[in-house]
Image (tube, rainbow, N blue to C red):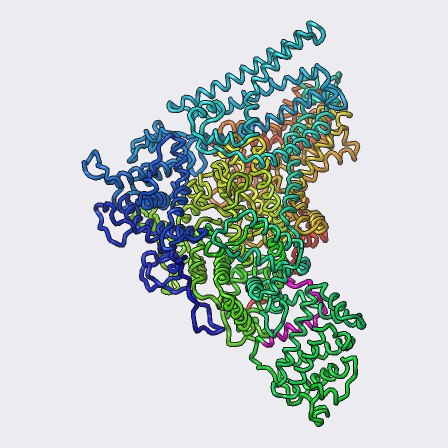
Amino acid sequence: MNLRQRPLPTGGRGPHAPPVPPPRPLLSEPFNIIPIHNLLADHPSLRYPEVRAAAAALRAAGDLRKPPFNQWHETMDLLDWLGLFFGFQKDNVQNQRENLVLHLANSQMRLQPPPAAADRLDHGVLHRFRQKLLKNYTSWCSFLGKRSQVRLPNRHNPDIERRELLYVCLYLLIWGEAANLRFTPECLCYIYHHMALELNYILDDHIDENTGQLFVPSTCRQFGFLNEVITPIYTTMKGEVARSRNGTAPHSAWRNYDDINEYFWSRRCFKKVKWPLDLSSNFFSADREKRVGKTGFVEQRTFWNIFRSFDRLWVLLILYFQAAAIVSWAGRDYPWQALQSRDVQVELLTLFITWSGLRFIQSILDAGTQYSLVTRETKLLGIRMVLKSMVALTWGVVFGVFYARIWSQKNSDRSWSFEANQRILIFLKAALVFIVPELLALVLFIVPWVRNFIEDADWQIFNVFTWWFYSRTFVGRGVREGLVDNIKYTLFWIAVLASKFTFSYFLQIRPLVGPTISLLNLRGVTYRWHEFFTSNNRVAVVMLWAPVVLIYLVDLQIWYTIFSSFSGLLTGLFSHIGEIRNINQLRLRFQFFASALQFNLMPEDHTLNSEATVVHRIRDAMHRIKLRYGLGQPYKKIESSQVEATRFALIWNEIIITLREEDLISDQELELLELPPNCWDIKVVRWPCALLCNELLIALSQARELVDTSDRWVWSRICKVEYRRCAVTEAYDSIKYLLLQIIKYDTEEYSIATKFFLEVDDYLRFEKFTGAYKTTVLPKIHEHLISLIELLLLPEKKNIERMVNVMQALYELAIRELPRVKKSVAQLRQEGLAPLNPNTADGLLFENAVQLPDADDAFFFRQLRRLRTILNSRDSMHNVPKNLEARRRVAFFSNSLFMNMPRAPQVEKMMAFSVLTPYYDEEVLFGKEMLRSPNEDGVSTLFYLQKIYADEWENFMERMRREGMQDDSHIWTMKTRELRLWASYRGQTLSRTVRGMMYYYRALKMLSFLDAASEMDIRQGSQDIFSLGSLKMNSGVNIGGATNTRSLNRAGSSVSMLYKGHEFGVALMKYTYVVACQLYGVHKGKGDHRADEVLYLMKNNEALRVAYVDEVHLGREEVEYYSVLVKYDQQLKKEVEIYRIKLPGPLKLGEGKPENQNHAIIFTRGDALQTIDMNQDNYFEEALKMRNLLEEFKVTYGIRKPTILGVRENIFTGSVSSLAWFMSAQEMSFVTLGQRVLANPLKVRMHYGHPDVFDRFWFLTRGGISKASRVINISEDIYAGFNCTLRGGNVTHHEYIQVGKGRDVGLNQISMFEAKVASGNGEQVLSRDIYRLGHRLDFFRMLSVFYTTVGFFFNNMMVVVMVYTFLWGRLYLALSGVEEFVRKANNNRALGAILNQQFVIQIGIFTAMPMIVENSLERGFLPAFWDFMTMQLQFSSFFYTFSMGTRAHFFGRTILHGGAKYRATGRGFVVQHKSFAENYRLYARSHFVKGIELGVILLVYASSSALAANTFVYILMTISSWFLVLSWIMAPFVFNPSGFDWLKTVYDFDDFLSWIKYRGILVKSDQSWETWWYEEQDHFRTTGLWGKLLEIILDLRFFFFQYGIVYHLNIAGGNKSIAVYLLSWIYLIVAVGIYIVVAYARDKYAAREHIYYRLVQFLVILLTVLVVVLLLHFTNVTAVDFIKSLLAFIPTGWGIILIAQVLRPFMQTSVVWETVVALARLYDMLFGLIVMVPLAFLSWMPGFQQMQTRILFNEAFSRGLQISRILTGKNSYQDT
């Protein structure tokens, strides 16, 4: 018998009673979710015996030894006992008590079948939880060869439950107070190991050897655990963070969280750290000589990390390139023809020499980067490094010797003799030995379970065998997937590699062989400069091959993009994505949708042993197929079951109501979309009006056309469309009910009407209707019925006479004209169809028989309006709802119900979960002044929102009027809060996120009611809701006074009015929302408005909790820090503090966001944790599916159950502007198709940010939901995915549920976001996680990881490098004169292939193709193609090319120099014009300078190349490069509001000149050029020697301009001596000298002795003119020479400045530095002028401003926005 006490229904409640709130216990002590301290309190959650059972199990502490030094109370439990013994904080104990009780209770509630005694804790629940919670600890013990301290008695011992509880509680208490140590899971294992040992000592009454007394832990005092255990390790971490110099020190100079944690991966921690902690240990030492250095891995900043982490990929690419080059050099058409040659076969053996060389490079890199790991304790590591280098070098020598012996034998024999072949055989035998490790890896790849077993076994023999191949680490073991998954992603990558290698051979490598041979054989080349290597043309060959090699290394990304797009398409098709793309398709399947909703969202009836058997699954699958493809008529079940129909109606209506609350639909659309309850004796399902509209008129026309056919034929035609059948039936039943309702009951007219309808019913029943009646009369009856209803709906006093006339006309039509057989009056009287009194026949019929309905009967009039719509509508209403977002949401929700998802359990039996949102100091609610204040263009935020969301604004105003607002001007006075909320819900604010996440709570309450409600509850409740809803929305009239938004939301026509009380308790037990408002305490202290707004959110959302860090200042220096949890107590009407847990010090040691999450995670509850960012939203209809999603944790995917459930996102900011549309489209393709492919088939989906759902207890024991080390973990979210994969987790992706997400909407915001992500990926390249993924995963998963994480950014950067290489190579060929001799080398397919591939990547193929494919899947091919073409017309390729430059710049700079930092992008609306100076500061180094450099190269090439004479060839060769230059220079202005406004351009240039001329560095960078210039060099402070050296080498390229151009000047006279170049430096030195003289004169004389300054200027000008005249007279110099020399010397000067910046530490103190700064200022002025020229020209040209506005805001134009009016400030909206 199940002892669960079900809550009893509350008696005596009226139909319109408000919802019953959860009863509050009359207790003074605050509690979080359940009052565990008082189990007798009247709280809904305490009605569940499972809660009492868990609490009772914890109280079994009676016979345990009492803690010393503290008074023991009988009410204390096991957690209190542990807290007193081990010195845990009281609030930590209380927090974990609730955490544990809730988890155990929820777990027991899920048991199936239920346990016999529900009021006793089931031991299986506790046992499984203990195993899961301590699994990582058990693995750690096994890894280190230590015995676990979790020692349990045998199964039959009655003490086993308490002992298991104690071990579980101990871990939770340690974790709950560990603060920043939660990022170091194995450090916690170490602490737990020793504390569990001490617990065993206490339980076993162990005698302490030192005292001779019973053992007492050293932490047994107040704050003992915090002070003695946590604080020492925290202090060590804090010291290491100080060594990092705020993240600017090299990673190798300090220990991050991972280093601290990995120290506990070896047994030395037991000897060094000891227990109690030995603070004299070098682990805690801050001394430079004694301290422990890096552990496990050293992050070194070098580009070689790309090779080192993914060496297997580069080995493959390099070896194939070599093989292809060898085969193609043979000159055959096809490779298999060349391979028949023994020479080619032998040449291919050189692959092994290359391979051994690559192994040697890898071993050198390992030693060079990881040498600091070698200590006395890790000697074996050093030995292995040396041995690996020696072995690789030996193999290279052996292969070289054997290879030489083969050719020497062949040359001596002059043929491939037997001896020569024998030497080949010897070489092959050596090669076989060489590849033995690879063959072994291949075998283990084919049988992955064997490899997993070997790695997980922790057997010493396996450790010995694997020692050579990799270091033994705790993570990265047993990460291979199952055989089926192996096969899937292997086939994927084989297809990709086959395509890539085929393309590369035939279109890249082979076409270049001929020109290369010709070039090498070319003799007598006349160079046009001083050539150092004239013996052959090898430099030219290198220039020819360099771009081909680079694109060869990169283009695998293109092939991955192509194949992943089609793989994602296939997966999406099989997942049934996009089957319902719009409202019209939903109309066709709505009846099946009703059944699908029942099937997926309503729990099935569980029998006692309801395990998901095979039969059960087959039945479910068959049912899904029927629903999906419309087999059978499942909706008939809905129609036959009033309860199911009403349950569906309740859910559907609640969805529609939330759309109305969000102002996405109007009141009228609400009535058109809702499902009313069955009333008025209607015999069919009452589908929404929007589906039935026009159907009745079609049925009438069919009946009129088929006038002489049988009833059956007419009815069968009508029934072909389900909605038509329902419309006809509902209309007839409603008319019958209506007429009998408005005719007085005891009158003769009532009996006539009754008799008439009985007669019609009989004819219909016996299928004689068309035989008895003329269907041609029906349209006339239809018209008169509409007239009658219109009269009834008139708001003024009804005209009885007109109504009687209409009734009389209806009577005449129905009785006299409708029947086919005319009847006399006598016959009619006899049949009861005419009045018996002859006087009544004189037109007085119905005169005294009509009774009007009560004017306040809103329910009646609502039904009447529905009937009028069905009868009257000629529109098929395909545009209901009108709002695009509402249409998208309804379509997605309906489609998702036909996708595969687990069946929903009852709310009581679902997994509990929490949502966690980190919040810093962003907007909570938009302020009144912020909404009203116009920007510089005269546009207020509110005005902008009104135009962007015009329909939603109208709906909002309609709602405000319904709620009592008399005049629209009162919106700023009466409804200020509602107005602020409306605006905030359309921005990226915390209030929007909170509203969305609280839909979970609302959904769970409703679903809980439906789970437990009886048939009578549902049927009667549906009537009550509809009646109340009618009162609220009757013709837009507010009845019963105004109600505020909250009361409308909570009670207005909502299912919440039916709740009985228990729903609140269940929902709170299953769901908690914690917002980590880090600065909430600071904001409260300052009286910041954000604190009040957060309090407002808590006040209106009872499941919301706020966690913050409180700083308590005790003295002048001393500060204590606390993690605090607060809530709003609805009974006390104030904010109450629930928990206050002291921290060891400041919260933020690492990156801010993960630290904020980490401090608040202890306050979360449940089995699952959804992480939500502050720019996200949620939808009520999606919240209904959360139960289904959480069931995925029970499903095995491959060989593992999921630990992260990936959730689809919907980017809601795409409608703001075309730029926002590009960004949202790019993001949308990644969060749908991209992540779909990563999860299946590639099995490498990570955690890319929120809203993924984590297995909470799995992650809290393994380091949490992100990593937080400074700088290296700046992209904190993805490290949770890396950590999950390396620790044997499983990440899946589910697209039947979505969460909203906002993205950046302005170019500057987007660029900062791209910079942040690119910099984060640059840091990932250095990380240990990427290295381990590259080495521990199998080859094909490693490829997937590379090309979907850092590889994407690396290849992006390499494309830019390839453009540089190609253009510099062409410039070399042109300036050297070689190009004239090798015309045919330019005309080849390889060059065309690389240019095409570069252009394809450049314009955004990585984004465009997945986007087109995904849009085709979800919306259809034509809409997707049209969207793509529209994007091209709106210059999306400009945007994608510009973004490529952003990513390349910041990724490359981060790898080379570091300097990654969090960039606050801002989440505001972008309609404000950005000044030229601001754009210059942001893009000068990343885009403008690079674009100008490439432009100069193209100009010099055009002037020097023989090919440029052929314009077509030049254009074909350089068009993609010119497009790149144009994009990088002009995109910031194309996508800048009012970017081409002439006046703004003029003002902007003045502002730019003022900024660049301002002298001083003690101001912000937006005020002073010098401050900005120094900030732009910050990355040189973090770089090392190699970074500086490489930077200088790269900067030397600018000297090439001068070297190449001076020999082309006429003044050189064809002289090719090196002296020409050296003499040219004189001109440069003179120019700099003149500038120094002028600058000196200006500084000294300009202010006081102005005449001297003018004299110096005059002399300089005179001297310059004199020199020019002399040159023109005595030399061959021409005017063109002067222009060319500018192109030569200006780049040289820039190169000198760049080198001087690198050498700044040495030069800053010298006199030269001021000159460098002055020249740099001059150059920036020059660059600004170059960028300004095309901008000014386009601004001056008429029409460009209007065109730019149209391009930038085209999407908004399509929604009725007049941006041009907005941006010119013609704001017609006046605030009052």
Question: Which quarter of the picture shows residue 1727?
Answer: top right
Q: Nearer the viewer, residue 1308 or 30?
A: 30
Question: Which quarter of the picture shows residue 1699?
Answer: top right
**At which x and y percent is residue 212?**
18, 36
Q: Which residues are magenta?
A: 860-885
Considering only vertical position in the picture, is 1681 above or below 196?
Answer: above
The quarter in which the N terminus is drawn is bottom left
Please say whether residue 221 is one of the residues in the magenta stretch: no
Residue 555: tell me if it is visible: no
**At which x and y percent is residue 827?**
74, 87
Q: Residue furthest top?
A: 412
Considering only vertical position in the picture, is 410 above or below 1202?
Answer: above
**At which x and y percent is residue 326?**
69, 20
Please say whether residue 878 is one of the residues in the magenta stretch: yes
Q: Nearer the viewer, residue 1293 or 39?
A: 39
Considering only vertical position in the picture, is 386 above or below 59?
Answer: above
**At which x and y percent is residue 592?**
64, 58
Considering only vertical position in the picture, is 566 above or below 270?
Answer: below
Q: Residue furthest left?
A: 212
Q: Residue furthest bottom?
A: 839
Q: Nearer the viewer, residue 507 or 1215?
A: 507
Residue 1185: tell me if it is visible: yes
Q: Nearer the viewer, residue 91 or 365?
A: 91
In the figure, is residue 961 to the left or right of 573? left
Question: Which quarter of the picture shows residue 702?
Answer: bottom right
